[in-house]
Image: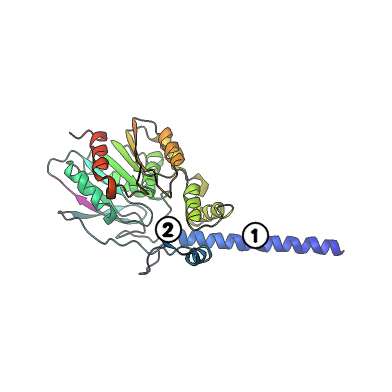
Amino acid sequence: MQRNRFWKRLAWTVAVLFLLLNLFCAWHAWKFTHFTHTTAPRTNPNRLSTLGKLKTVVLGVDNPRPVNNSVPSVPYETITLHSDFPLEAWLVRVPRARGTVVLFHGYSGKKSSMIDRAMIIRDMGFNTLLVDFRGSGGSGGNYTTVGFQEGRDVKAAYDYLRKSGEKNIWLLGTSLGAAAVLKAVKDGGVEPRGLILEAPFATLYEATCARFRAVGAPEVPLAGLVVFWGGAIHGFWGFGHRPMTDARSAKMPAMVIYGEKDERVGRWEIDAVFKNLGGEKRLVTFPEAGHVNFLSRYRPEWTAALREFMKVE
């Protein structure tokens, strides 16, 4: 009788702990994928104290809604794209354009963060279209799916340009943006002239593990549960979000760009995405660059790589 009580209590204890662990991870998944209307700065794990990291592990990340803090210094047109939400975009035109490059920002980013890249591409003779993903800047919504549903946002931009008569369309995505581009190619029937993929992560699970590593929290089992609940909250199978697998559908020319000191995306992830790309491809790495901060140190090299890849004389 006493032994039976022990096992019953143990079973209840395990069940309660399992429930609490899942509630904890579901809360983190919600915080990780939802933006708040607050002026508090976004949580940067690299700048947190030990106490700050512990607070983040317990309470989750602070994820304020990204707000555009600048506009292009040249004439531009604000347009609305139609995805699951209205998406705000800036279209910068040039006379006798060679084509149009669409630029997609990363996690907790906004289109104003892509202005620097867009101006370089404009000087190469291309129109540029800078897009706010759902939940960011001037677009509708208040959440992110880290590239999964954002694939539909990429398709909305691509379809807009196709309907306007543009045939020479290039897609440039940074981190989450790169994952969304690959998702649009796989599931959306998007067939641009070429892809420029900056620091694409291999899987949502690996991207989540990187977040836990940044604050010194155990990846197992926390990352897996956060991925499960993040997908469940937004209606998809989180472990199925695999840009490295989506890359197999990309038969058009593609260039992958990576900083060798990237603290969020591992080199093996880049190699996995690059290996699966099905068309003409090129890998460009910058030895001293971190996560997508290429222009701060490698502006001439980044520009030269794009000019060569896009065959701009």
Closest to the observer, 155 or 201: 201
Residue 112, horizontal then vertical, whole percent: 26, 56
**Label annotation for residue 46:** 2
CB under 8 Å between callouts 2 and 1? Answer: no
Q: Is residue 244 above or below residue 65?
A: above
Answer with left or right where residue 298 lies relative to residue 57.
left
Quadrant for the N terminus, please.
Answer: bottom right
Q: Quadrant of the C terminus?
A: top left
Classified by dominant secondary structure, the portion drawn in magenta counts as: strand
Residue 273: x and y, percent? Answer: 42, 38
Q: At which x and y percent is residue 35?
A: 40, 63
Q: How many marks?
A: 2
In the rendered image, residue 47, in percent from the top left (x then y), is placed at 41, 61
Residue on which the image places disc 1: 18
Q: Is residue 228 left or right of residue 115?
A: right
Element assignment for label 1: helix
For numbered disc 2, what is the local secondary structure?
Answer: helix
- The CA distance from mark 2 to mark 1 is 30 Å
The amino acid beneath tag 2 is Asn
Task: Pick whichever, 24 or 99, lies toward us.
Answer: 24
Which region of the structure is painted magenta?
Answer: 90-94
